[in-house]
Amino acid sequence: MSLFDKFRKDDEETLEEELPDLDLDLEPETDGAEKPTAAPAAVPESAASDEAAAETEQTDPAEESGATVGGSEAQTPDEAPDAAAEETAAEAPAVIVGEIDDPVAVENSASRRVTAAKIIRGSILAVCGVVFVVCLVLIGINLYGKWMAGTVYDPSEMGASDQPGGLEVLKKNSRPGTISDLSMIENGGDEPIITPPDNPIDDPDEDLRLELVRKQAYIREKQAQNPDVFAVIEVKDSNILYPVVRGTDNDFYLTHDAAKGFLSIGAIFLDYRTSTHLPDNYNSVIYGHNINGGAMFHDVTLFADSEFFRTHDVYIYTLDGLYIYKPFCYYKPHVSSGYIKRSFTNGNEFAAFANNIAAQSMTRTDKIITGDDTIITLSTCLNMTTISKYRFVLHAYLDRVIHE
């Protein structure tokens, strides 16, 4: 045995003792036998990279020059699978990052959507409920206002001409003549005594004079309760028949009746900056609420009809006499348009003002206002919203005056 073989055998025995679990077939090499091929030693990564680079540099010049076969680029067997893989990748649908079929995430997303829908439905229902309640309140206020208007402002107290036993009794037993101030019939009735003249003549205003007497009696009665009462306003074929007051401002009678009691529908009142002797004013402005159902100044809107506009006048009864006004303008101005202007330097300025508003009327007339005319302005709200900046307005000029 050679010295080399002896060392080798000693090394094998040492390895067997140290690694008993390894089944190593370390048979001694026999003479004449083929030596086993040793496993290639591990090549460092850096060395492998260098070898790959060297192989790349030694590529076939024909491949680098892009040689073609049959008129097309030559394709090596290794390149064909890569091209097919690229095609498959291009056809595959794009994967959206974050789109993970997570049941918990899906459930949470659905829960959030349901919660949002519930909030939206709840909000809509709440708004509808508030609107419904507001409508009920407004309807209640209007119904109450209409009832109060009929209770506080009883037309029969104002000597309405359509009341039984009213003017017909006076007309049957009298002719126009001298009307006593407030002399009453001895049997306790409330009709004034009329003394026939020596030479009776037909009077076309007989009915109006008799009605004036009744209204004057009502005014005096109400003045004893409230000195602010000075007139009665009436429009035939409408619900406008109310006492008229003038206060110390334009706010108090918005919420108080003609007896100064609290009333949400207020009273019909003259602008406090004008005279109760209406002919002294170029423009006598009278205000009233627009109450649904026809109460207060709601029926000012009837003048929007051209036929009603042309055939109906405004009657204002005072202790001075009956003032009859003919409409010349009905429209819907903005509150800041100056339609309630009362002070003018002269008649020409007033005439220019009046004719300017007449040009805006929904129904036109041939009347030309002059500096010698005087007018009234009836103003009421639109009754669509409390914050509306527009008004229904009727302007009428003084046509004639009837005295006792």
Image (cartoon, rainbow, N blue to C red):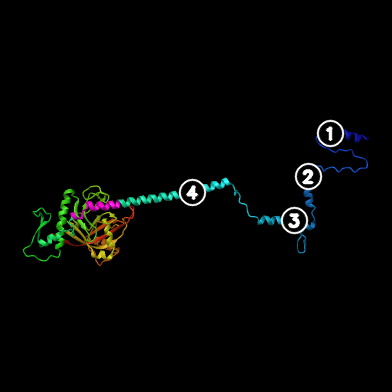
Q: Nearer the viewer, mark 2 or mark 4?
A: 4
Residue 120 lies, with reference to residue 31, above or below; the image says: below
Left or right position of 189 against 268: left
Callout 3: 10 Å neighbours few (<14), some, many (20+)?
few
> What SS does tag 4 mark?
helix
The disc labelled 4 sits on which kind of residue? Ala
Residue 16's disc number: 1
The disc labelled 2 sits on which kind of residue? Ala
> What SS does tag 3 mark?
helix
Give the mark nearest the N terminus, 2 or 3: 2
Magenta segment, which residues?
A: 141-157
Residue 47's disc number: 2
- Can you say which quadrant of the picture contains the C terminus? bottom left
The residue where tag 4 is placed is 116
Give the mark nearest the N terminus, 4 or 1: 1
Q: CA distance from mark 2 to mark 4?
A: 64 Å
Q: CA distance from mark 3 to mark 4?
A: 55 Å
Q: Position of residue 41 (x, y in %)?
A: 81, 42
